[in-house]
Amino acid sequence: ANAVVSNLVITIHASARSPKGAEAALRRMQGARLAPDLASYGAVAKAAGRSGDLPRTAAWLSRMALAGCEPDARAHYAVLTACAQVGDLVAADVAVARMRAAGIEEDIVSHTTILAACAPRAQLAEAEGRFEAMRRSGLQPNAFTVNAMLGVCAAAEDPYAAERWLLKLARLGANPSTVAFNGLLRAWAVAGDVGRVGMWLERMDSAQHSPDVISFNTAINACALAGDAEAAEEAFSRLTDAGWQPSVGTYRALVKPLAQSGDHHRVRELLQQMEAKGHPRDVFCARALVSACARAEPKAAREAEHAFRLSSDDLRQDGYAVKCLLEAVGSKRFNVLAEEFGIRIRPGWRSAATRSAAAAASGTVRPRSPAPSPVEGGDSGKSERSLQWRPAP
């Protein structure tokens, strides 16, 4: 029973990607005069592999053999996992050769792990070639294969390839998971194509993969990157209507475009809502409110001061938040607050605020134009909400 418990502890450390914890648990097991078995050594190797420590993982396979426990397929998978973490295809091929020498057949797990090894160095062409080789060997891709290929496409910053591969693998019978769809959403979000994000969010429902909180957060973040607060609010409404609870990440993404547009009332409202749900206001969110106050027309000096005071321990060390406070309240009031909060003024902060104030007084400040619509090509100003979420061609 004690050996079973010890192996369970080692496995927990492996799941947490903690090789030090797994090794310490193995030493305690040996100290209790319990003989580690194949499962014990395999779990330690898995911990090392998941942490991306290739030499450490290989060393544990050697120790297994010396202890009379011949490494099985799972132990070899640990080495492949380490190769995938660091993107070492040469070492992965060596590991596969050792598997063959040990009489272990290559399967979909080993092939998928090698595909994942192409991601750290964004080797999309290599991954595509290896996928075709896998198909020629008669193996059928599965949901994990989809995730691996989309991970490589994301690393290569090629959302079109990600879209193409998701559709191709679905045709081959590999049912894409929610994780795969989220990877595709993330790829289009990084590319700034809000329309494509919206299209695939709709397709998730039709493919019987209801969007989760990560899906909606990705959509909100895409809108934030495009500077479209209205579309971000729509995605937020869809998240709550679907019964999901917003996370801190949700609120972070949502307040970003609102802060850029100077909507301090809505930013404050959302932060209060976030706190009511048990999420404390972090530095990013506190900074967003001060920034919104500085960008508002007219500037919301009192609210900026109040917001800064609530999080002063964190914000007084934040250069951006301090500059926003200076811009919001003006130099005279800022001098008083700087002394109160113990802010160390850095060169350039005052001059930046002075230039901003002078430009505003002379009427030379250009209005902040919203980001162009990624769907319409960017020549029509702020796009309507319907344009943001219509299916892309």
Image (tube, rainbow, N blue to C red):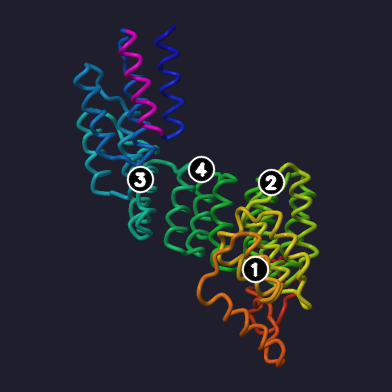
Can you tell which mark lies on residue 280?
2
Nearer-the-camera pick, 135 or 176: 176
Stretch of the chain drawn in magenta? 18-32
Nearer-the-camera pick, 287 or 247: 287
Disc 1 residue crowd, few under 14, some 14–19, many 20+, Cα 10 Å: some
Give the side of residue 53 with respect to residue 179, left or right. left
Q: Quadrant of the C terminus?
A: bottom right
In contact (CB < 8 Å): disc 3 and disc 2: no
**Kind of residue at disc 4:** Ala
Q: Which residue is at 67% across, 65% downward?
A: 337
**Kind of residue at disc 3:** Ala
Point out the tag, 4 or 1, that comes first from the N-terminus. 4
The answer for how far apart the CA atoms under marks 2 and 1 are is 38 Å
Can you tell which mark lies on residue 392?
1
Point out the tag, 3 or 1, that comes first from the N-terminus. 3
Q: Give the labeled residue for mark 3.
A: 84
Point out the tag, 2 or 1, that comes first from the N-terminus. 2
- Depicted 198 relative to depicted 204: above or below: below
In contact (CB < 8 Å): disc 4 and disc 3: no
Point out the tag, 3 or 2, that comes first from the N-terminus. 3
Disc 2 residue crowd, few under 14, some 14–19, many 20+, Cα 10 Å: few
Can you tell which mark lies on residue 143?
4
Q: Secondary structure at mark 3?
A: helix
Q: Secondary structure at mark 2?
A: loop
The answer for how far apart the CA atoms under marks 4 and 1 are is 25 Å
Q: Position of residue 179 (x, y in %)?
A: 56, 46
Q: Position of residue 112 (x, y in %)?
A: 39, 43
In contact (CB < 8 Å): disc 4 and disc 1: no
In contact (CB < 8 Å): disc 2 and disc 1: no
**Kind of residue at disc 2:** Pro
Point out the tag, 4 or 3, that comes first from the N-terminus. 3
- Can you see residue 217? yes
